C-alpha cells in the first residue's frame, strides 16, 4: 500500500511521481482519499491543495516549511488492474502481437521480437503510442510539466 514519508521532503522544491497498480487500491476509494489517508497527520508537511486530473491521476501540493512547496502526483496504473496491462497493450501497438498481461508472456514476446527490455520497447514507441498505452502516466507527466512552467 502507499506510504509517504514527509521527512524526505527536504531541500529544494521537488516533484514526486508515485506509481501504483490499480489492484493495490481500495475499489471504491479515490486516489485523493488514499493519499490523504496515508499522509501522517502529525507530519511537518501539510497538504496545501489537491486536484484530481482524471480518475486515475491525483496531484497534491504539500508544504514542508513555510513557502517551500512540493508536488506529489499519484498515478494508478493498469487498464484494469496493473502496469503489465499497459505494457502488453504497447507491445500489441508496436509489434502487432497479442500478449497476456503477464510478466513471463511479455518477456517471451519481447525476446521473440528481438527487443531486449521493456525500456527499449518504450524508447522505440512514438508519443502517440505511449499516450494510447499509458494515458494516465502521460496525463500525470503533462500536469507536472504544466505546473513547472507556472
Image: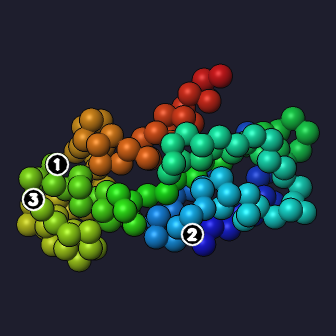
* Disc 1/disc 2 C-alpha distance (Å): 30 Å
Residue at screen point 51% across, 62% down: 20
Who comes first in sequence, dot 1 or dot 2? 2
The residue that label 3 is drawn on is: 97
* Disc 3/disc 2 C-alpha distance (Å): 32 Å
Q: Quadrant of residue 28?
A: bottom right
Badge 3 crowding class, 10 Å Cα cut-off, few under 14, some 14 to 19, many 20 or more, is: some
Q: Secondary structure at mark 3?
A: loop
**Marks 1,2: beta carbons within 8 A:** no
Q: Quadrant of residue 147?
A: top right
Quadrant location of the C terminus? top right
Percent position of residue 119, x then y: 31, 55
Badge 1 crowding class, 10 Å Cα cut-off, few under 14, some 14 to 19, many 20 or more, is: some
Residue at screen point 30% across, 36% down: 127
Residue at screen point 63% across, 67% down: 2
Q: Nearer the viewer, residue 113 or 95?
A: 95
The residue that label 1 is drawn on is: 93
* Disc 1/disc 3 C-alpha distance (Å): 8 Å
Q: Secondary structure at mark 1?
A: helix
Q: Secondary structure at mark 2?
A: loop
- The answer to whether residue 77 shows anywhere in this view is yes
Q: Is residue 9 left or right of residue 119?
A: right
**Marks 3,2: beta carbons within 8 A:** no
Residue extending farthest front: 28
Amino acid at each position: 500500500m502507499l506510504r509517504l514519508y514527509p521527512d524526505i521532503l527536504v531541500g529544494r522544491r521537488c516533484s514526486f511521481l508515485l506509481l501504483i497498480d490499480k489492484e493495490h487500491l481500495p475499489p471504491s476509494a479515490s486516489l485523493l482519499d488514499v493519499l490523504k489517508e496515508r499522509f501522517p497527520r502529525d507530519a511537518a508537511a501539510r497538504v496545501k491543495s489537491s486536484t484530481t486530473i482524471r480518475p486515475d491521476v491525483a496531484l497534491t501540493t504539500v508544504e514542508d516549511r513555510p513557502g517551500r512547496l512540493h508536488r506529489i502526483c499519484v498515478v494508478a496504473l493498469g487498464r484494469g488492474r496493473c502496469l503489465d496491462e499497459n505494457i502488453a497493450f504497447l507491445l500489441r501497438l508496436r509489434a502487432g502481437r497479442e500478449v497476456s498481461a503477464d510478466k513471463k508472456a511479455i518477456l517471451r514476446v519481447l525476446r521473440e521480437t528481438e527487443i531486449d527490455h521493456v525500456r527499449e520497447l518504450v524508447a522505440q514507441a512514438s508519443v502517440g503510442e505511449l499516450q494510447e498505452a499509458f494515458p494516465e502516466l502521460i496525463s500525470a507527466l503533462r500536469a507536472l510539466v504544466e505546473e513547472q512552467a507556472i
